[in-house]
Amino acid sequence: MRKFFFSGGFLLAGGAIFSKFLGFLRDRIFLEIFPPEKIDFIFAALRIPDFFYFLFVGGTVAVIFIPAAAQLSPRDTEKFFGSFFCGVAIFFGIFSAAGFFAANFLVEIFAAGFSAAAKIEIAALSRYFFVATFLLALSSVFAAELQRRQQFFSVAAGPIFFSGAICVGTFFFGEKLGFSATGISAIFGAAAHFFLNFLAAKFLKIKLNFFWQKPKFAFKNFWPDFWRRILNNSAFQINYSADILIASFLAAGTATAFSIGANCGQFFFSIVGFPIANSAFPKLAAAKNLCDKKKIFFSALQKILIFTLPAAIFGAIFAREILQIFFNLRGENLQMAATTFFWIILSTPAHCAIPLFSRVFFSAGDTKTPFFISSFSLLFSTFLAAILSLKILEKNQIFGLAFATFFANFLSVAIFAIFFRRLFLQK
């Protein structure tokens, strides 16, 4: 029993559940404190640094670091860890600084449909989030090494500190400081996230020495692999950013309703799909043959389906009631959010299986196949969302955004299944 409660999958899932509920609470606080017409600004401001964070760090650091470090001696691993941390600090530090100073320009790309006055507020808030994402980027390197060692406690707890800080700061200071309270709280939450993983690393005597690309053989083909993984992540990030961009041209409140509905619909992705995939990845990377990888994959997939199939049915049936309980939505906002939630929760089993499929190919040294599949399905989804929402549908335009996401998830899994079968038949 003790082994179960301290296993990686349980800790990551438990931390994700707690963090996700804090995320719901955060959105509820936004709805209670800020004017309805301005909540769209917060979600637009969050999307800009989130795009770059999840593009370069969130979905990249662990899947690059863990397989490479697994092949090294302890001494070489220490050098590789120091080099990796140094690279992330420099690269993402420069990128975050550029985003901070170019926030007005980025708003013109990511939120073009808002008014000029709204864009000024969105840019100001996004600068706070760029500082926070830099701290999260540094924390992610420690988290990757902790995951490699299968030490998941601080990795699971970090997001709780981050989301909790935003909730507390916005609740107590939102009315007085406005949007700045959310931004400042995000920085404090990111700092707590970093120090938690840093202290866990110190406790485990993980040394941080600053090197540059040492050992050299560990960085062989590193940059081509890095950019392939970046491109693999780009499809989803472009898709989600395009949805917010499309929403900025639709009725006021659409961005908020879509974000709330999508966040709820992706609940089990955060607490089941991603934790199980991350927990299985070190085992997949260490597996010596494809037969072992196949056993690990199907064991993880079984766990995903056990949780997500009942959740998809229950969530689709009670979509409106769930949103009313958590967010106290009414009228048109409830209708738009419920439409989004309904279609995305229905695709939960497929959505949660995608990161697991990707990590099978990553562990086999194949980054091209996940990139091709993600790019094709999600970019097609973006095109479908734009056509439905902006051209075809005059009423219920948010249906276009929601249905396109539903379609992309099942399309991705269908193509992954085909390539997955070919991978094992060829071997």
Image (tube, grey):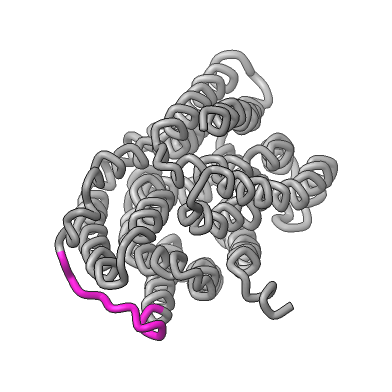
Left or right, 258 with respect to 304, comes to left
Number of marks in the image?
0
**Residue appearing at x 63%, y 59% in the figure:** 24
- Residue sitting at x 38%, y 78%: 201
Q: Which residues are magenta?
A: 201-211
Displayed quadrant of residue 15? bottom right
Q: Is residue 98 magenta?
A: no
- Where's residue 16, x and y in %? 60, 63
Q: Residue sitting at 62 percent across and 40 percent down?
A: 351
Farthest top residue? 392
The residue at the point 64 percent across, 57 percent down is 271
Quarter the N terminus occupies: bottom right
Relative horizontal placement of residue 218, taking residue 64 as reference (left or right): left
Q: Position of residue 317 (x, y in %)?
A: 84, 41
**Drawn side of residue 235 relative to residue 1, left or right:** left
| x then y, percent, for residue 81 | 28, 66
Image x and y of residue 376, in percent: 48, 24
On screen, residue 225 above or below 382: below
Magenta: predominant secondary structure element?
Answer: loop
Residue 142 visible in rendering: yes
State the residue in front, 5 or 292. 292
Which image quadrant for residue 130?
A: bottom left
Residue 380 or 421: which is nearer the viewer?
A: 421
In this rendering, does residue 177 appear at all? Answer: no
207 part of magenta stretch = yes
